[in-house]
Amino acid sequence: SLSLSLPRFASWGGWSREAAGIMSQQLLPTFTAPGMFLADLDVRFDLPSSIINCVAGEHCIDTLEEVEDSKGNNGERGKLMVTNLRLIWLWRKRASLNLSVGFKTINSLSIRNTDSKLRGRTHALYVIAVSGGRRYQFIFTNLVPNTPRLFTTVQAVKRAYDTSWLYREIKLRGALVEEGDLKLLPSEEIYETVHGVANLHRDEGHMGTMVLTNVRLVWFGHMNESYNASIPYIQVTSVGLKPSKFGEVLSVGTRKDSVKMQIGFRIEPLEKLKAVTLRAQRLLQVALACPLYGVFTTTEAQPEPQNQLIVEPSVDDVEIVDTDTTDAFAAYFADSGKDRRTDPEFNEELGLAVEPLRHGVTMASLWAVV
């Protein structure tokens, strides 16, 4: 079975030497994020090994060694990898023949019958995905009989991916704040809270609070907390100082495949602005070195297939004695839907009127039950 959970993140002292080196760097005029392959946002075919293997922040949750791509490679054995970002199918004979289906592109998952050249008529996982304006259908058949592992794993990880979108997507005007405090995501940690930050979006100055965490940059207004923005680091393209008609500001740019925008934040005095910008640049660099996508799992021992569960026959240490004695408990069993209402009759042993006994049952045997 598969259980989904989120791990606790260590403090800065527990990060790698690379992260520690980043945190000691000096302020850059503008830090521009390098281009990233966001594996969950696309459908790709025949990728090179550098991309088909897990990218930064991606980890393999489960690997099914015997899976057929019944849609495009019917009759060919392959391997299906389920990661926290996508489904990866690799042909056994040549790994360069592969496909990658990001969870963001998947519209529906269903279990239906299909015709497999290796298993015949059987159940398969149908995946409908949309990418680049095109609609794709994939059919994966587990060649190992009597196991629902393919269906349960993919559905569980997809559900966990869908419910953790705040780690990966920009959210504007959401329910992010409660009574002046940021609602933290599981395992999210706050590294700096800056009050008196003006949001200059659309050249309008709204005073508020900026919160820098290990996952995202968040700003919310003082007068109206619902006027806010949550920007995960994996959506940020640049962080730096930029001149404006309000003076020098902290400028944050985001990716065009998301909510593309350039937001300026005014912080006074200048020394404080530079310190906050430096902290934001460091957090962004560390986050991009090992992105936190929000889907983490722990796997438990997989149950054995039914065809491997063999129960040895056992012989009960009981001797069966065949006698003519009637079981007393049978007198209490109801007749199958028949109405046996009869008039009572006098019983000499009890000196009372009782219901007539069934054939073969004596008053002495009834007393034996007690």
Image: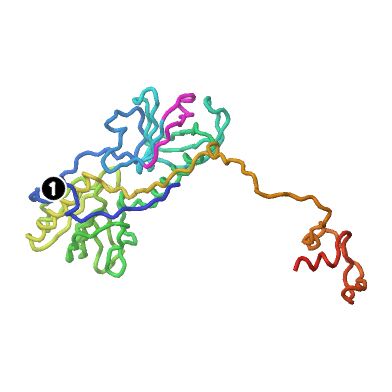
Residue 141 against residue 323 in the figure, above or below = above
- Quarter of the picture containing the C terminus is bottom right
x and y percent of residue 249 in the render?
Answer: 13, 56
Amino acid at dot 1: Ile
- Per the image, the residue denoted by label 1 is 22
Left or right: 255 in relation to 335 = left
Query: Is disc 1 placed on a helix, strand or loop?
Result: helix
For this rendering, which residue is in front, 336 or 175? 336
x and y percent of residue 261 in the render?
Answer: 24, 49
Tally of numbered tags: 1
Crowd class of label 1 (few under 14; some 14 to 19; many from 20; radius 10 Å): some
* Residue at image location 49% in from the left, 40% down from the top: 304
Left or right: 91 in relation to 209 = right
x and y percent of residue 135 in the render?
Answer: 43, 35
State yes or no: residue 63 in magenta. Answer: yes
Residues drawn in magenta: 61-78
